[in-house]
Amino acid sequence: MITNLIGESPHITGYSAREWTGGRDTFAFVDLDSGELAGALLVHHLWGRWSEIAVVYVREEYRGRGIGREMLQGALRVLRTSERHLLLFFCSPGMGRIAERSGFQLLPNEAEFVRGSLRRKVFLTVLYKAQWLCSAYRLREIRRKKREFGCSFDFAVAVLRHEGSR
């Protein structure tokens, strides 16, 4: 169900049902009154002690209630004990505000993320891209959303470093 809902979002590239269940952390926000899924958050654990908050999605009828922020902060409480750096790519101004209020450092683009750091450049251009682009489903969704919604997927970057790292 969540993959169908996200299919209508111009801000999320697309994640297959398999990606929502295998080797990732999935957080769900359920409306206790109706039992409906109100939102979901997906975390990918990547090489090099990085994890990506890959999706923060709130169904349209539940937006404006702080659910996205609550999901992100709940996930951060769990993930902060993992000694991993957290990464979030976003193209929606609302997601940028939520990330910043949750303690992420905002960077305008990938070039700023890698500036001055060979380690980050290798991580982003080789390791991350290899993991992220290995999904035929996602590649199809990117093409479809570019065609149907005119999406550019010019992502800004939010970073939250593990406190024990330099």
Image (spheres, rainbow, N blue to C red):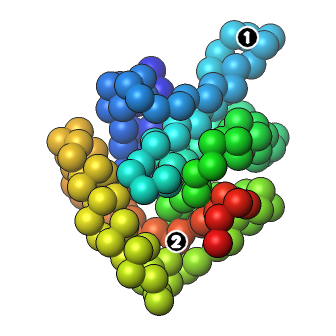
Residue 97 sits above or below residue 17 on the image = below
Q: Is residue 131 left or right of residue 161?
A: left
Q: In which quarter of the image is the C terminus?
A: bottom right
Which kind of residue does numbered mark 1 sit on?
A: Ser
Element marked by disc 1: loop
Please provide percent x and percent y for residue 86. 58, 55
Task: Name the residue rendered at 65%, 65% in the picture.
Answer: 165
Element marked by disc 2: strand
Estimate how packed mark 2 is, as few (under 14), some (14 to 19) or many (20 or more) residues with alpha carbons within 10 Å.
many
Q: Is residue 121 visible?
A: yes
Q: Quadrant of residue 62?
A: top right
Residue sticking out furthest to the bottom: 116
Q: Quadrant of residue 68?
A: top right
The residue singled out by tag 2 in the image is 156
Q: Is residue 16 left or right of residue 88?
A: left
| Mark found first going from the N terminus, 2 or 1 | 1
Which is more foreground, mark 2 or mark 1?
2
Q: In which quarter of the image is the N terminus?
A: top left
- C-alpha distance separating marks 2 and 1: 35 Å
Residue 82 sits above or below residue 112 on the image = above
Depth check: 29 or 51 in front?
51
Please provide percent x and percent y for residue 127. 30, 59
Task: Name the residue rendered at 46%, 43% in the picture.
Answer: 45
Task: Name the residue rendered at 58%, 77% in the picture.
Answer: 107
The residue singled out by tag 1 in the image is 34
Depth check: 104 or 152 in front?
104
Task: Name the residue rendered at 78%, 13% in the picture.
Answer: 32
Which kind of residue does numbered mark 2 sit on?
A: Ala
